[in-house]
Amino acid sequence: MSDLFSKFDDLIALREGLLSTGVTDPFNLVMEKVESPTVAICNGKRTILLGTYNYMGMTFDPDVVAAGKKALDEFGSGTTGSRVLNGTYVGHRAVEDALKDFYAMDHAMVFSTGYQANLGIISTIAGKDDYIILDIDSHASIYDGCAMGNAQVVPFRHNDIEALEKRLKRVPEGAGKLVVLEGVYSMLGDIAPLKEMIAVSKANGAMVLVDEAHSMGFIGEHGRGVAEAQGVIDDVDFIIGTFSKSVGTVGGFCVSNHPKFEILRLVCRPYVFTASLPPSVVATAATSIRKLMDSKAKRDHLWENSKRLHAGLRQLGFKLGTDEPQSAIIAVIMPDLETGAAMWEALLKEGLYVNLARPPATPAGMTLLRCSLCAEHSGEQVEEILGMFAAAGRATGCI
Ligand SMILES: Cc1ncc(COP(=O)(O)O)c(C=O)c1O
């Protein structure tokens, strides 16, 4: 019998090699208590959280928490059914209405995760004989959506407008075309030149889907994302988003103005063949989304935090993923996995949690310490974080 697990041998050896150095497993941390959007207890120690996607700090918002508790009392713990059968409650409609208002779009469809939203929308709208042209650094859920469908998949170099145009021009005459882009790329925290890319896509007859998972609530005048900030949101055919980042809970969605959009509820398998979100989750999401419509002060503070951390880390001598802060994600580039893991552990001992990211999630084989800021981080916390980076950087020889 061949062992089906032998394909994982290299990864098992890499992991064992890393752990044999005595370093704490960076992919197995337990939060013993979470006190706020920015502080948790890990290994008995107060730890500042700088590796969550809680950009707008909504997880402990009193209105959000109260809405969840109320829905739990009134509707129970789960729907135990698909959206197209017994799994649509008033709360599911209410969160879709909140999304339509938030994005000023005609249609909104909520999935159980953002992963499933990409899986479902991409695999359903791009079928046999269609072409998907996507940025090579696209999120795994976008690639998995491509793999699940039957379209031809054509990647182009990250954020390269000319490369996108060349690929579009090579698509056979008459074939359906879907260009898939992200607003913020989550590994390096860089943004896409959506204005130019969408113009090129439209000039070549393509529909455009933009995943705004990491920009919702924060980027753009109304927090609608990078497409809004660059003035091209009206040219986007489908926006994909998630509740697991700025919204502060779990779930995913697609919003669109396409007149035939609602038919997707009957043909999109990751929407039909899975249970809908629990009533407490959709209630927290709807409350959070409505509050995010009116959070300019929080957005401004988050930009301040991002600029302050980026400048401080640069001053300390760390190599960063972007020359300027472009989002709430600041990636610190590590020379290799061993140094990255040592630095990650040193930061944790200082009382700071960041994300250690490695291939295949990262581009170009990079090891990254990904810092994601929250609107609830105070200016003092950002200074404290910089002090911790200085101490850990010196202890590990990174700076
Ligand atoms: C760009 C992007 N799209 C989609 C997702 C999936 O979101 P969710 O956590 O809701 O499954 C993520 C999650 O990290 C993401 O980064």
Image (tube, helix red, strand yellow):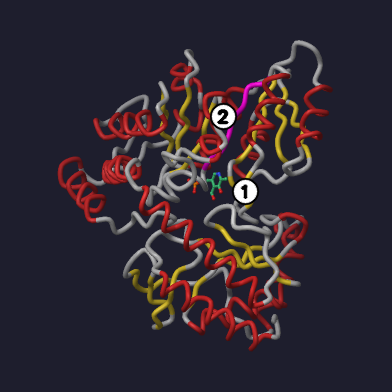
In which quadrant is the N terminus drawn?
A: bottom right
Assess whether residue 195 is covered by the magenta stretch.
Answer: no
Mark 1, ligand 1, within 8 Å: the answer is: yes
Left or right of 249? Residue 74 is: left
- Badge 2 amino acid: Val
Mark 1 to mark 2 CA distance (whole Å): 18 Å
Residue at 32 percent across and 43 percent down: it is: 294
Residue 340 coordinates in the image, percent (x, y): 67, 74
Task: Pick the residue in front: 215 or 9.
Answer: 215
Q: Residue at x 48, y 56 (%)?
A: 303
Q: At numbered mark 2, what does the secondary structure look like: helix, strand or loop?
A: loop
- Residue 155 image-quadrant placement: top right
Which percent across, then down, holds residue 397? 70, 85
**Which residue is depicted at the point 55% across and 40% down?**
226
Q: Is residue 397 above or below residue 174?
A: below
Residue 384 seen by the camera: yes
What residue would you read off at disc 2?
A: 232
Q: Secondary structure at mark 1?
A: strand
Residue extending furthest toward the top = 174
Disc number for residue 185: 1
**Disc 2 crowd, CA 10 A, few/some/many (<14, 14-19, 20+):** some
Q: Main secondary structure of the magenta part?
A: strand
15 or 337: nearer the viewer: 337
Q: Is residue 372 left or right of residue 1?
A: left
Closer to the observer: label 1 or label 2? Answer: 2
Within 10 Å of the Cα at label 1, are there few (<14), some (14-19), or many (20+) other Cα atoms? Answer: many
**Residue 344, position as x, y percentages in the image:** 59, 76
Whole-percent x, y for residue 109 in the image: 42, 29
The quarter of the picture where residue 13 lies is bottom right
> What are the residue bounds of the magenta stretch?
206-212
